[in-house]
Amino acid sequence: MAEKAKNPELMTTIEEILKFAIQREEEAARAYGELARTTTDAGLKGLLLDLQADEVNHRKILRELAGSDDLPQLGSAVPDLKISDYLVDEPVNADSRMQDILIFAAKKEAKAAELYDRLLGQSSNPKHKRLFQFLAQQEKTHKLKLEQIYEQQVLQEN
């Protein structure tokens, strides 16, 4: 699986796909948690803890899928506000502003959605396609949430 973690195109089973996705969620949750522990800004800490909770919940959903033969239910299409598409993300740290964290997180979610969309396009297995579609949809939902917060917290304040 080490090679597959570096090259997800090599994944051939639902279990491998879910394991890969769970690892990505765990990494994201860890990163948000670390930033939350180091920031001194209370509002930013709350946002980071919310982002961490979203990733933990997503991991929980994926783990439940791993123990089931059922395929995930797909929701409706997720709108894309495209706000973060035109913004430059900077490396984040404990001193980052909320605006920077939101841009960083939205771009991270967009990259994850793009990965799953690419894997969806490369897959010929209908079950894999459905799972990749679900995973991409989840990441797009996270991006939408972050862009809505950005719109409320940053754009409307300026």
Image: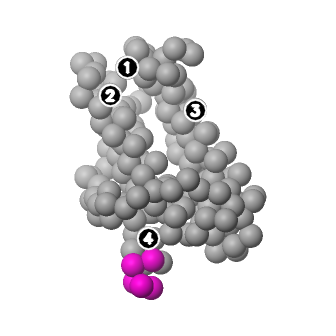
Q: Position of residue 33 (x, y in %)?
A: 69, 53
**Tag 1 near tag 2, CB within 8 Å:** yes
The three-letter amino acid code for the residue at tag 3 is Gln
- Residue at x 58% of width, y 69% of height: 97
**Eye-nearest disc, 4 or 2:** 4
* Residue hosting label 3: 23
Magenta residue span: 154-158
What secondary structure characterizes most of the magenta part? loop
- Tell me which numbered mark, 4 or 3, is placed earlier along the sequence: 3
Report the quarter where the C terminus lies.
bottom left
The three-letter amino acid code for the residue at tag 4 is Tyr
| Neighbours of disc 2 within 10 Å: few (<14), some (14-19), many (20+) | many
Q: Position of residue 106 (x, y in %)?
A: 44, 56
- Residue at x 62% of width, y 61% of height: 48
* Residue hosting label 1: 9
Would residue 108 be found to the left or right of residue 81 on screen?
Answer: right
Q: Which mark is residue 119?
A: 2
CA gap, disc 4 to disc 3? 27 Å
Would residue 5 be found to the left or right of residue 128 on screen?
Answer: right
- Tell me which numbered mark, 1 or 2, is placed earlier along the sequence: 1
* Element marked by disc 1: helix
